[in-house]
Amino acid sequence: MVTAALLVFSVVRDVAGVTRFTTGNPVEADLVKGEERTIYSSRPAREPSFRPEPDCEVTDAAGQAVPTTRDGSFTLTLGEEEFHSVARFRVSEDGRYRVSCSLDSAEPIDLAVGPRIRIFRSIGRVIGAGAVGLVALAVAVAIVAFTAVKRHEHRRRARTS
């Protein structure tokens, strides 16, 4: 149960950094060198079976394009909406970045940009936290056992003296 809670906490922490926007309305984000972000697209309410693949562009403060990679490997649920990943990018410098997406559609599409969520990394964190807990428990048991043995030896010596 604790493991499941830690896994949920780890993923929720990543999801908390998600910023929502729509096609035609770019969003800006202050990012640190090496950070990786994912761009997500929502399915429109009128056509739930349609999975939009918008064209997204990321630029730095000087207007230089940041390379993006197509990515359809993850689905994210925010409230009632389901988003799927469409692209990801990594920034090479600290600064403010502009993310804009377009799609040939009369209706704006809901989008989101946020940290790249890596389930296996989250599972690794949970396993690591569990291992630390087990080590702490083993150390505590060893201390209690050592103390009990020493106390027993001390009482035995006190009786024979």
Image (tube, helix red, strand yellow):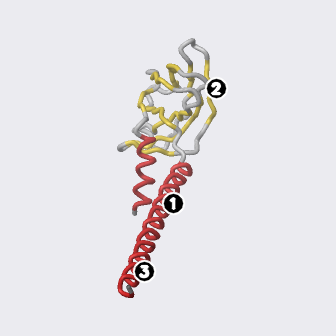
- Mark whose residue sits in front, 2 or 3: 3
Q: Earlier in the sequence, mark 3 or mark 1?
A: 1
Identify which amino acid the numbered label 3 is placed on: Glu
Is 133 left or right of 55, judged from the image as shown?
Answer: left
Q: CA distance from mark 2 to mark 3?
A: 70 Å
The residue pinned by badge 2 equals 67
Classed neighbour count for the residue bearing mark 2: other residues with Cα under 10 Å, few (<14), some (14–19), many (≥20): few
Foreground residue among 22 and 60: 60
Q: Earlier in the sequence, mark 2 or mark 1?
A: 2
Q: Position of residue 1 (x, y in %)?
A: 40, 63
Q: CA distance from mark 2 to mark 1?
A: 38 Å
How many numbered marks are there?
3
The residue pinned by badge 3 equals 153
Q: CA distance from mark 3 to mark 1?
A: 33 Å
Q: Earlier in the sequence, mark 2 or mark 3?
A: 2
Mark 2 lies on a secondary structure that is: loop
Foreground residue among 160 and 144: 160
Classed neighbour count for the residue bearing mark 1: other residues with Cα under 10 Å, few (<14), some (14–19), many (≥20): few
Q: Are marks 3 and 1 in contact (CB under 8 Å)?
A: no
